[in-house]
Amino acid sequence: MTSLSRHKLIQLIEGAIFASSSPLSLIKIKQQLLVDYNVNHQQVIDAIGEIESAYQTRAIHLVEVASGYRFQVVEAIASEIAILFQEKAPKYSRAVLETLALIAYRQPITRGEIEDVRGVSVSSHIIKTLFERDWIKEVGHKEVPGRPALLATTKEFLDYFSLKSLAQLPELMPLSESSINDIKIKGTDIVKEDNTQIRETETSTKRNK
């Protein structure tokens, strides 16, 4: 294998993360980008650490999300920079955001359990929307009559909201059937983390059925 200077190692990793259209995992960096070089795990970690430090005071940061590493604009200026991009952000109903919040905080959870907490039926359109965004997935079936599917969030959900793991979700008070207002608040907080990429729109319950 070819030896590699520390400077070039940092350049390769920085360039690869910058050029990647999706977060770049540590495994992909080691097994694909650096496959022909004699570089160990700790050297890669140290190089990533140096890149993170170099961008601490810049307009973009190197961040680690569930799927790997990526560069993104710092939150303090993200909304101002968004003015340059004319593409309208998708809008989601309150019902979609409440459903997503329940899945995120109570996973794995069935559709029926979501309905019990929300107090209204969950339309197929809501579930379809979340599946189409790759924010949720089926992780099994609950061993009760009918064996309903158990729903959970995905790595794509974590990546979208710049989270490395579910442990980084905002804290939530203990849930009960009467605490749906807490879920609405926390669901909105998660949306704000994404710098207005999702906005709530009021839709009637009848429309979602």
Image (cartoon, rainbow, N blue to C red):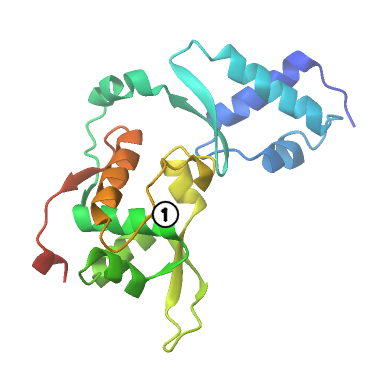
Whether 90 is drawn above or below 13: the answer is below
Mark 1: amino acid:
Tyr
Taking the view exactly as shown, the residue that stands out farthest to the bottom is: 145
Kindly tell me whether residue 135 is visible in this rendering. no
Whether 157 is drawn above or below 41: the answer is below
Kindly tell me whether residue 74 is visible in this rendering. yes
Q: Quadrant of the N terminus?
A: top right
Determine whether the residue tagged by mark 1 lies in a helix, strand or loop.
helix
> Which residue is nearer to you in this view: 60 or 179?
179
Q: Identify residue for label 1.
A: 105
Left or right position of 45 against 179: right
How many C-alpha atoms fall within 10 Å of the one at disc 1: few (<14), some, or many (≥20)? many
> Which residue is nearer to you in this view: 38 or 109?
109
Q: Residue at x 41, y 88 (%)?
A: 146
Left or right position of 73 against 24: left
Q: Residue at x 59, y 20 (%)?
A: 52
> Which residue is nearer to you in this view: 42 or 85?
42
Q: Residue at x 42, y 54 (%)?
A: 105
Q: Residue at x 35, y 34 (%)?
A: 193
> Which residue is nearer to you in this view: 44 or 192?
192
Provide residue 208's location: percent of width, then percent of height.
16, 66
Q: Quadrant of the C terminus?
A: bottom left
Provide residue 97's location: percent of width, then percent of height.
27, 52
